[in-house]
Image (spheres, rainbow, N blue to C red):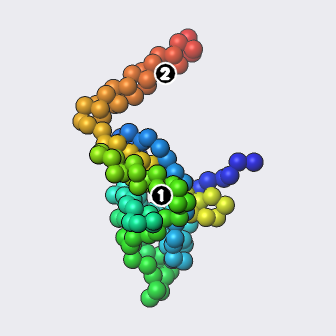
Amino acid sequence: MADEQKVIATNRAARHDYFIDDTFEAGLVLWGTEVKALRAGRASIVDGYVHVEGTEAWLENVHIPEYTQGTWNNHAPRRRRKLLLHHAEIDQLLIKTREKGFTIVPLRLYFVKGRAKLEIGIGRGKKHYDKRQTLREQQDNREAERAMSLRRHD
């Protein structure tokens, strides 16, 4: 049986703005009210990014709204959160991001077996003409699929 994933948030703009070279799955250090807000399915990772400080990876600028039934000990919506990765993975991220043009972007936020996970990718920024080329390829594929579908129904 495959691990059932409950996707909370995706960053579709990341695949539009970056060529994703490699992906990693990271755990998150969260507070209780953050987990409850995520279980309600509310989060935004669009503006988020990851950076490495020493031997730790940190998730910045991800918005997890305050839990509505939370009390005075509710969390700050855009606080920085520590990512749980192996040292070898952190070393890989550090080496790659030292190269010009590479960054670490969050791709998906989801639950696996009750634990919050974040899929991060090492991305290389696309130029404007790369984005146009990608859109053109997607349109061509869509038109080809539509033509084949119509042909099958005739």
Q: Which mark is residue 43?
A: none
In the displayed orientation, state which residue is furthest to the left.
128
Q: CA distance from mark 1 to mark 2?
A: 41 Å
The image position of residue 77, as x and y in percent, is: 39, 72
In the displayed orientation, state which residue is furthest to the right.
1
- Eyeballing the image, is 74 above or below 79? below
Q: Are marks 1 and 2 in contact (CB under 8 Å)?
A: no
Pointer 1 or 2: first along the chain? 1
Residue 58 visible, this orientation: no
Q: Residue at x 49, y 82 (%)?
A: 70
- Helix, strand or loop status at disc 2: helix
The image position of residue 127, as x and y in percent, is: 26, 37
Residue 133 placement: quadrant: top left
- Eyeballing the image, is 29 above or below 89? below
In this rendering, which labeled residue sits more in front, label 1 or label 2?
1
Question: How many neighbours does mark 1 have within 10 angstroms: few (below 14), some (14-19), or many (20 or more)?
Answer: many
Q: Which mark is residue 90?
A: 1
Q: Amino acid at mark 2?
A: Glu
The image position of residue 31, as x and y in percent, is: 51, 76
Q: Nearer the viewer, residue 17 or 142?
A: 17
Q: Nearer the viewer, residue 85 or 34?
A: 85
| 28 sits to left or right of 127 | right
Q: Quadrant of the C terminus?
A: top right
- Eyeballing the image, is 99 above or below 140? below
Q: Amino acid at mark 1?
A: Ile
Q: Residue at x 34, y 58 (%)?
A: 47
Residue for badge 2: 145
The image position of residue 140, as x and y in percent, is: 39, 22
- Helix, strand or loop status at disc 1: helix
